[in-house]
Amino acid sequence: MSEDIFRIIYKSAAAHPADVMLGHGHIANLLATARQRNRAADVSGVLVYTGLGFFQVLEGPRSSVQPIFESILADRRHHTLAVIEMDFTAERRFDGWAMGFLGTTRELDDRLNGIGLGPVGGPETLDRLLRRTLLVLVDSPISMPWLGAREDGLGAALARRF
Ligand SMILES: Cc1cc2nc3c(=O)[nH]c(=O)nc-3n(C[C@H](O)[C@H](O)[C@H](O)COP(=O)(O)O)c2cc1C
């Protein structure tokens, strides 16, 4: 039923540079927690980490999405969170993904460049980058083979579909 799925889309800025976010395990840790909690709560979605910031889609019963989002809001691994969309939706876009992950892969760069974003530069491009990513993902979610792929050693576990 159309009223059943609540979806929040937001973007935020990472609290630390990419070498710290990746090297200190921030991303891997938050993904492990997220997948466990989301799966138990019937929440699905995708997390995009651009190296500068995050973009995330969370979808599921409102009573599940809301407390998870409140935890995310309070999380100090990111800041300057801005909600892009918060509404009920007819269907999930990331059904089966406890939290898909899209990192700063060459594929993503190529794809974003292919739609005219240009090279990813300083913080001023974050807004533009996240908006482009949103369009690419929400228009054509999980069928894309590069969703979840990484090149930095975090490995195939991150690409697994749950
Ligand atoms: C960018 C980002 C995305 C996150 N996504 C999720 C998520 O989808 N699900 C989740 O349970 N926790 C997610 N977390 C972790 C939560 O912020 C929080 O640490 C975790 O849910 C544990 O909740 P608690 O701190 O209230 O105990 C995310 C954190 C960050 C920084």
Image: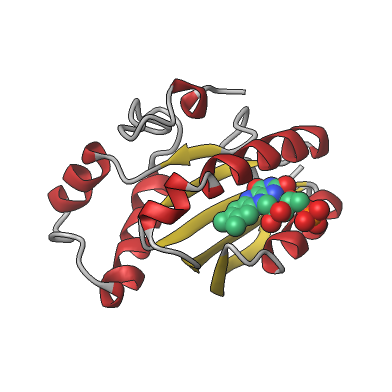
Residue at the spot 58% in from the left edge and 62% down from the top edge: 77
Q: Report x, y in % for residue 144.
A: 35, 30
Query: Which one is nearer the viewer's eye here, 151 or 22?
Result: 22
Asked whether 6 or 77 is in front, the reply is: 77
In the shown orientation, is residue 80 left or right of residue 155? right
**In which quadrant of the rendered image does the N terminus lie?**
top right
Compared to 82, does 24 lie above or below?
Answer: above
Q: Percent from the top left, x then y, of residue 75?
A: 67, 64
Coloration of the structure image: secondary structure
Residue 91 appears left or right of 122: right
* Image-quadrant location for residue 128: bottom left
User: Seen in the image, is 127 located left or right of residue 90?
Assistant: left
Quadrant location, the C terminus: top right
Is residue 83 visible to the viewer in this orientation of the structure? Answer: no
The image shows residue 108 at horizontal and vertical percentages of 27, 43
- From what the image shows, is residue 144 above or below residue 108? above
